[in-house]
Amino acid sequence: MEIHKSRDHQIIEQELNENQVLASMWDVLIENPYEGMIVVNAQGYIIFINNTYLNILGLKKSDAIGKHVWDVTSHSQLPQVIETGRPILYDFWEVNGRKLIVVRIPIINNEGNVIGAIGKSLFTDIPSGKLLFTKLQVLEKELAFYKEEIRKVYKAKYSCKNLIGESESVKEIKKLARKVASSNSTILITGESGTGKELLAQAIHNAGCRNQRPFVRVNCAAVPENLLETELFGYDDGAFTGAKKGGKPGKFELAQGGTIFLDEIGEIPLTMQSKLLAVLQERELERVGGIKTVPLDVRVISATNRNLEDMVKNGTFREDLYYRLNVINFRLPSLRERSEDIPLLVNYLTHKLNKKLNCHVEGYTEQAMQLLTKYHWPGNVRQLENALERMFSFTDDKILSTEHMPFLKKIVNVNSSEVNTKSLAETIAETEKKMILDALQKVDGNRNKAAKLLDIHLSVLYRKIKKYDI
């Protein structure tokens, strides 16, 4: 059968004849001794076959060119590729007792018509293919190992069982946490310092389908403003002077498939808020100094002890970012709002601290538990735990009494046998007013310094001053 050269074929041949360098490169490509190649036209007739494949078949070029592929290899699947227009990739193929790994690809013109097909052997023997397969397996195992190491470093350790309390507010939080854990919705957790915002975030992560993936925490208040962008989004090689060679992934990339917890989200400067908003909207990022877009599969949980709605009103927090973060909202109550949970928390923390400090505290006198319950705990659960740890560190007693709590007795008006009979609200009000007055006196009336001394936001201090008519 006579094979007519197409116009394109003639042009290529002319170029090869005129350009010896290109011709040499072409010969290397098509006469690769490690790769067999065969090309057929739309009718299945062979229009090209390289020497490597001829050697595998044990034929001369004159025995193959112009013949139908089935006359050369009776079980060829190239006609099937021409008929369906679909490739057959990475197939095992045996020719003359030699096992090959081959691909078969249709040739499609600009009009979308199949005008032929190419068959290529990726390896001229199975051992070579097995060697690559073995290397890929090793790489996959190494990748799985590093992923597991990242997961161990960025691992959430708390679950819903660590949300201690039987008050109605805590029951409702547990119920909602379990309900939303399996979704990918963005969550905002609000509440005073020490109420357990990160604990709740970890519990939600561990209760969901992402629990085998990383839980990455970022304290937005602790990262300097000029480093926050690279901390969150990473940077590419050469992004700035001193940049690590090869670049560095940011916390968002490290959290791929898992959860990123943006703690103290209210402290992010306005310049970064717009960049964070863009990442949350598009679910992709670009590293600092990079040009490649990285798609993200990350659940975002943020937390703050600040009033973001007030910040939106005074222009220090973007309204669009607030609504993007506040899809599902959890408000954690302060400890004074759920004082009925304090005995449960004390017992839980006692067990935890006994293990941590190798102590043997077994319980508390009734008066001691009343004292712990009556105190308003402005630092919430964190302050309660720290107070208990202080007591554990200075005693070998198994039962703790009010005598082990002199720092509380000074604040809460009690004697050695019973707690005073004032209501909790009255005690809180008196204590708060006294602490504010003492703080203002220490700093000569400077309200900014007083707020820092009391570890509260300035706006909270102003409300308290107005409330107590100070």
Image: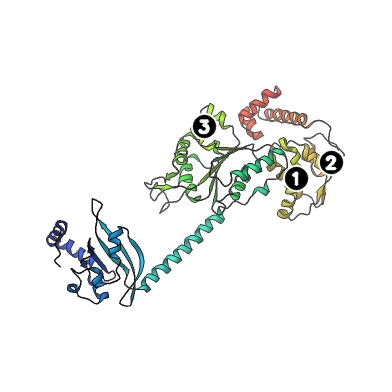
What type is the residue that disc 3 sits on? Phe
Residue 224 position in % (x across, y down): 51, 41
Q: Give the quadrant of the N terminus.
A: bottom left
Q: State which quadrant residue 42 falls in.
A: bottom left
**Residue picked out by circle 2:** 367
- Please tell me which residue is depicted at 81% across the width and 49% down the height of the picture: 363
- Please tell me which residue is depicted at 36% across the width and 65% down the height of the picture: 90
Q: Are marks 1 and 2 in contact (CB under 8 Å)?
A: no
Q: Secondary structure at mark 1?
A: helix
Q: Is residue 35 left or right of residue 403?
A: left
**Residue picked out by circle 3:** 317
Q: Secondary structure at mark 2?
A: helix
Q: Is residue 235 left or right of residue 30?
A: right
Depth check, front residue: 405 or 366:
366
CA–CA distance between discs 1 and 3?
Answer: 38 Å
**Residue picked out by circle 1:** 344
Structure colour scheme:
rainbow
Q: Are marks 2 and 3 in contact (CB under 8 Å)?
A: no
- Nearer-N-terminus badge (1/2): 1
Q: Is residue 307 above or below residue 66?
A: above
What type is the residue that disc 1 sits on? Leu
- Nearer-N-terminus badge (2/3): 3
- Nearer-N-terminus badge (1/3): 3
Q: Are marks 1 and 3 in contact (CB under 8 Å)?
A: no
Depth check, front residue: 244 or 140:
140
CA–CA distance between discs 1 and 2?
Answer: 16 Å
